Amino acid sequence: MKKVMAQSNMKLQVLILLATTLTISCGQYGEEIAEVFVESGSVAVLPCQMSVPDVHSPAVQWKRESGGEMKTVWRRNRSGMEYRSVGTSVRAYCPQPNFSWGEFSLHLSGVTEKDGGMYHCVVEGMKKHTRKVMLRIVRVSFTPAEVVEGNSMTVSCNITPQPDRVKTTWEVRGSLRATSQSLTFQHVSQKESGSWSCLVNSDKASGKASASLQVKGILNPEDNSKVVYAEVGSSVTLPCVFSSGLFVSSVSWNKVFNAADLSTTFATSSKIFSGLYFESVVEENEGIYKCSGQVEGVRRRSEKMERYIHLVTAQILSSSISEQLSLSCELSNSSRVTHYEWLRLDYGENETQTLSTVQNSPSKVLKIPKGEERHRGGWVCRFYEHQTLLGNATYHQPMMSGLEGMNKSENNRKIITIIGLTLVALLVFLILLQMYKNHRRRKMIMQYPAMETIVHLASNERERIERSNRKEKECSVDLKSISV
Ligand SMILES: *[C@@H]1O[C@H](CO)[C@@H](O)[C@H](O)[C@H]1NC(C)=O
Ligand SMILES: *[C@@H]1O[C@H](CO)[C@@H](O)[C@H](O)[C@H]1NC(C)=O
Ligand SMILES: *[C@@H]1O[C@H](CO)[C@@H](O)[C@H](O)[C@H]1NC(C)=O
Ligand SMILES: *[C@@H]1O[C@H](CO)[C@@H](O)[C@H](O)[C@H]1NC(C)=O
Ligand SMILES: *[C@@H]1O[C@H](CO)[C@@H](O)[C@H](O)[C@H]1NC(C)=O
C-alpha cells in the first residue's frame, strides 16, 4: 500500500520537525554522526540501526537538512503508509522487511552532488530515536574537459560537502601516486591516460571514486622510449596512431641520424596515419625515426605532436671454426636485452613446427652440437628484457644447399640433354645434307648419259688406233732394216 502525498506532508512535517528538534535537543548528549562517502552516480546507503524496536510497527522518517530547513525524503506512519517527497520520490527507498530487526537504512540511487548533506533518521515507537548521517558525494573531475597532450590539466577529487579533515590518495593505473586532493600538470602526456581513482579517508569512513582520462594525442607509441625489433627480411610497421577525435592535417616521417636536426624526410603524406611500413627490413633500416603530425583546432590552434621510435634489426649470423658451427643472434642495438633463448626448430608431419629450448643464457652465441648441423629445420633465437619477449630471429638450416645441389644436377642433366639433342639434330642434318648432295650429283650426271659413253668410246678408239699405229711402225722398221 503506497501513496505519495507530498503536499499534505508539509504540514505534518512541520509538526514532526518540532517534535524531532525536541528529541534531538534531548538526545544530543553522546549523539554520534555517521559519515558516508559515496561516489557520484552510485547508490548511497545511509545507515540507521537501532536495537530491536519497542513496538511492532514504528513510524520512520528520513529527512535532510537543507538551507536551514528539514525536508522529508521518505516517511512511513505507524499503520504502514509510505510517503516520499517529490524530488527524491523515485530514488529514495527503505527496505521495510528489514525494519523488524531494527534496520532502517535509506537507499538513495543515482546520487549527485546535490544529495550531499546531513540526513536524519527518526524512528518513533514507544520512544523517539534519532540518528544523523552525513552523506558526502565524491567525484573525480578533469579540467579542461578535453585534455590534449602537451597542454595543462587539473585533476580534482571533489567531495560535497567538503569535510574539514580528510586524507585523499590517488591511484593511477593501479598504482598509488599522490596525496593532494587536486593535481595540476603543465604538460600532460599519455602517461596520465587511464583510470584515476581517488581514495578518501576520514576518521569515521572511507570511500572511493574513479574516472577514466583520455589524453588526446599520439596513442601509440605512448612516449619516445619505444623500440621496435624486426628481423632482417621480415616486414614491420612503425606505429604512429593518433586519437580518433583529433583532426590531423599531415603526418611526416623522418629518419634521425644525429641528436641534432640532421634528419632526412622519409615520407610525408596525409594518408600514413597508422604507421611507416617496411616490406622487407634490411640492416640499413636500423635507426631512430620521428613521426610528426600537425594537429588542427586544439583550442583554435595548430599544434605539432611527435614521437621518436627506435627500429632495431635482428638476424642470425653463422660461423664455423674448426668444423664447429656456431650461431650468433645479432641485434643492431642490444642495450635492452638481458638474455637470449635458443630453440631448436623441427618440422614434423604435415609441416607442423615444434620448438624446443636448447639454451637460455645471457650469451647471444649458440654452439651447435656435432651431428646436429644438418637436422631438417632450423634454430630460433628469442631475446628478452627480463620477462618481456622483445623479438626473435630464425636461422633456417642450409637445406637450401642440398636443394641447390639437386637443382644444379638437374640443370646439368638438362644442359646435357640439350647438348645431346643438338648433336643428334646436327648429325641428322649433316647426314641429310650429304644424302641431298649425293642425290644432287647423281641427278646432274644422269642428265647426260650418252656423253659418258661417247667419251668412253672415244678414248677406247684412240687407244686402239695408237696401239695399231705402234704395231705398224714396228713392222716398217723391221722392213726397212731388212731392205737396207
Ligand atoms: C497513517 O496514514 C493513513 C493515511 O493518511 C491514516 O489513515 C492513518 O490513520 C495513519 N496512521 C497513523 C497511526 O498515523
Ligand atoms: C536487509 O538487511 C540485510 C542485513 O543488514 C542486508 O544485507 C540487506 O541488503 C537488507 N535488505 C535490503 C532489501 O536492503
Ligand atoms: C642503443 O639504444 C639506446 C636507446 O634505446 C641508446 O641509448 C644507445 O645509445 C644505443 N646504443 C648504440 C650503440 O647505438
Ligand atoms: C597429418 O594430416 C593427416 C590428414 O590431414 C592426419 O590424419 C594426420 O593425423 C596428420 N598428422 C599429424 C602428425 O598431424
Ligand atoms: C617470432 O616473432 C613473430 C612476430 O612477433 C611471431 O609471429 C612468431 O611467431 C615468432 N616466432 C617464434 C618462433 O617465436
Image (cartoon, helix red, strand yellow):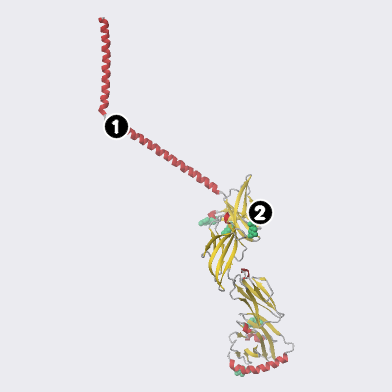
- The answer to whether one can see residue 393 in this image is yes
Dot 1 surroundings within 10 Å: few (below 14), some, or many (20 or more)? few
Some atom of ligand 4 lies within 8 Å of the CB belonging to the residue at label 1: no
| Image quarter hosting the N terminus | bottom right
Q: Is residue 418 above or below residue 284?
A: above
Dot 2 surroundings within 10 Å: few (below 14), some, or many (20 or more)? some
Measured from the top left, where is residue 167 in percent x and y?
Answer: 70, 77
Task: Say whether residue 128 is left or right of residue 278.
Answer: right
Q: Residue furthest top?
A: 484
Residue sitting nearer the eye, 176 or 1: 176
Tell me whether circle 2 and circle 1 mark residues in contact (CB < 8 Å): no
Some atom of ligand 5 lies within 8 Å of the CB belonging to the residue at label 2: no
Q: CA distance from mark 2 to mark 1?
A: 90 Å
* Element carrying mark 1: helix
Residue 290 image-quadrant placement: bottom right
| Image quarter hosting the C terminus | top left
- The residue pinned by badge 2 equals 363
Residue 153 image-quadrant placement: bottom right
Q: Is residue 336 above or below residue 413?
A: below
- The answer to whether one can see residue 334 in this image is no
- The residue pinned by badge 1 equals 444
Task: Say whether residue 419 is left or right of residue 434.
Answer: right
What is the three-letter code of the residue carrying label 2?
A: Ser
Residue sitting nearer the eye, 44 or 41: 41
Measured from the top left, where is residue 482 in percent x and y?
Answer: 26, 5
Mark closest to the chain's N terminus, 2 or 1? 2
Measured from the top left, where is residue 380 in percent x and y?
Answer: 60, 54
Residue sitting nearer the eye, 67 or 409: 67
Residue drawn at (28%, 13%), measured in percent from left and top? 470
